[in-house]
Image (spheres, coloured by chain):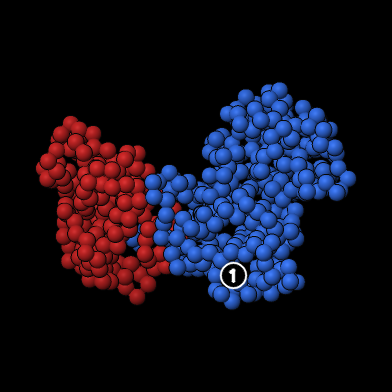
Chain colours: A red, B blue
Amino acid sequence: MQIVEKAQLMTATEIDRTVQRLAHEIVEKSGGTANLALIGVRRRGVPLANRIAQAMRGIDGVDVPVGTLDITLYRDDLSKVAAQPILQSSDIPFTVDDKDLVLVDDVLYTGRTIRAAMNGLFDLGRPKRVRLCVLIDRGHRELPVEASFIGRTVQTSDTEIIEVRLKEIDQEERVVLVERVS
Amino acid sequence: MSYRFGHMLGIEPLSAGEITFLLDQSKPFQEIQRHPLKKLATLRGKTVALAFFEPSTRTRISFSTAASRLGADQMNLQAESSSLKKGESLLDTVRTLDAMKPDCIVMRHSSSGAPDFVARNLALPVINAGDGTHEHPTQALLDALTIRDRRGTLEGLNVTILGDILHSRVARSNIHLLTKFGCRITLCGPAMWIPRELEFLGGAKTSIRRVTRIEDALVDADVVLTLRVQQERLHEPMIPLDEYILQFQLTPERMRLAKPDALVLHPGPIVRGLEIDPAVADGPQSCVLEQVTNGLAVRMALLFLMTGSGADAPPEKDSSHAAD
């Protein structure tokens, strides 16, 4: 079973421009940043959330708080993940009650990760609103989950995988479309 | 680096890496204890059999709460009110439980080696909640987590263990664990309770010494682990309690010999005025309540690792792109 790179979808510059645009969109569509908070879904949602918060500092001058959420304990498909998942801690240093939350993740696919993330969030309190921001929406939803803020929508097939590589985690910066070839 | 644990029978066979992994994996479960809603659905549909052939309150409640908070169901066997009184053998008892298809069994037994025996006879993950005088692995893990959280490390600490070490599985598990991290162990108590053989635990590179005076034992200690006096053993030749208090009670004066930031640990239940002075038991150096909270986190982590979905899948090094 091999993984073959089929196409590069985004370069480093394109990722950065998209992050800037997403930050602007979120500020625009939130009626202000007073109650806003970002929650990065581990792993790659975390650097994305941090970058969006950083961009927001440039726009509004406001520090939007960022939390990190590990969804491993809330997954419904642990046996399909194959590996023994390594737990990380969630770290949300603010109360979730009455907050206008934006979940941030790299790729939206079946929607199960976001379902699990919402379970995690609601264990912490009662947010006023939860919206979703993703870098890539690749379709194939299996649950009624939708993103309010999307970097790019990409049509994919089931054998394809979209890999978002970010320098904080992968030591390179690009989005690639790969395929499993047996 | 991820590890698999088929059983958790003792600390002795584990490597420092495996222990560090278990402590790290306990951290998310410590965090969950601070949520308003502490219940997860992670082990929903799984059943944890709690087979306590020896009385226990804190350990049993801890494992039971750990299972509940993970969403698992429980089978509860308690020795006092069971068919063991009718003469049923250990093997028959666990086979009966096994026939009801639990996903793991947590057991405490008065015979050293009983969990190992069960592990060899059943195809079921076994967690040792204390066997005879042999081991109590989850206690040592929660003690280690407590020490590591407070001191930042487990490496090279001076650890003093006080009391009836001869009969203590808690002491043995702790000695196994802490020596794997290069800690220097001092054992202190009435001579008949500190067998010479304990100096040889853990192999050539470990540093374990026995002393008879508590003052010598406490100088420069980083951690003081106080064991309880097992008064249920009063029928055996034993030091009079007054003598024990005079010579071995952990008092504030004696604690001043230890390092100023030394930690005081106790597996419980505490008898204030016997092995420990109330001022020490309730003072700022005492970690007893944290131990209990950490015990819940450690047991949740173990139940998750040993019975969670994916527990029987082969380990992979990097699952970072497996999520959707």
The residue at the point 64 percent across, 56 percent down is B129
Tell me: residue B261, above or below residue B275: above
Tell me: residue B239, above or below residue B257: below
Q: Quadrant of residue A64?
A: top left
Q: Residue B71 location in percent, x, y?
A: 45, 60
The residue at the point 62 percent across, 52 percent down is B57
Q: Residue A121 location in percent, x, y?
A: 32, 50
Quadrant location, the N terminus of chain A:
bottom left
Q: Residue A116 location in percent, x, y?
A: 32, 58
Total numbered labels placed on residues in the image: 1
**Extreme-front residue of the structure:** B81
Q: Residue B142 location in percent, x, y?
A: 58, 46
Tell me: residue B65, above or below residue B280: below
Along the viewing direction, whichever of B231 and B90 lies nearer the viewer: B231
Which residue has dot 1 on it? Answer: B124
Task: Inspect this view and state whether residue B17 appears.
Answer: no
Q: Secondary structure at mark 1?
A: loop
Q: Quadrant of residue B118?
A: bottom right
